Amino acid sequence: MQKLLLRGAAIVGLAVLAGCGESLPEQALLGAGAGAGTAAVLNGSIATGALVGAAGNVAYCKAYPGRCR
């Protein structure tokens, strides 16, 4: 149970970081970091996590630019 709570807290913490960044490279880098960190916590592929995180954060910031500044 404690391991599940730790993973959940890590995911929430990394998700909070994913909405930041003022430029496209900054958004991609922060998303990649959040994705890689989440993948590491969940024992997944870090490269895949970074790729998905970068793409997801850039897409989110394009859809909701006011929330990413």
Image: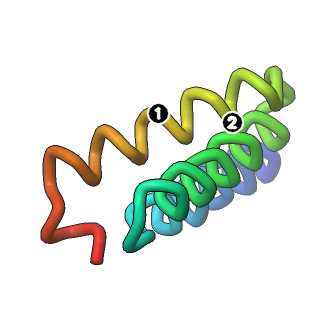
How crowded is the residue under tag 1: few (<14 C-alpha within 10 Å), some, or many (20+)? some
Q: Which mark is residue 37?
A: none
**Which residue is disc 2 drawn over?**
50
- Whole-percent x, y for residue 57 in the image: 42, 46
Residue at the bottom extreme, as displayed: 69
Name which residue lies at 67% across and 57% down.
10
Q: Is residue 37 left or right of residue 14?
A: right
- Marks 2/1: CA distance? 9 Å
Where residue 1 appears, x then y in whole percent? 74, 44
Task: Give the labeled residue for mark 1.
Answer: 55
Eyeballing the image, is 33 above or below 13? above
Residue 7 locus on image (x, y percent): 71, 48
Instruction: Identify the residue at image location x=75%, y=49%.
Output: 37
SS for callout 1: helix
Q: Is residue 47 above or below residue 12?
A: above
Which of the 4 image quarters holds residue 9? bottom right
Q: Earlier in the sequence, mark 2 or mark 1?
A: 2
Quarter in which the C terminus is drawn: bottom left
Looking at the picture, tell me which residue is in the foreground, 14 or 18: 18
Q: Amino acid at mark 1?
A: Ala
Classify mark 2: helix, strand or loop: helix
Q: How many marks?
A: 2
Q: Residue, x 79% and y 52% (percent of image)?
A: 2
Task: Please state which amino acid type lies under the numbered disc 2.
Answer: Ala
Q: Image height check: is 43 above or below 14?
A: above
Residue at (44% x, 70% y) in the render: 21
* Callout 2 crowding tier (Cα within 10 Å): few <14, some 14–19, many ≥20: many
Q: Is residue 17 above or below residue 6?
A: below
Residue 27 location (% of width, % of height): 47, 58
Of 7 and 51, the residue lying toward us: 51
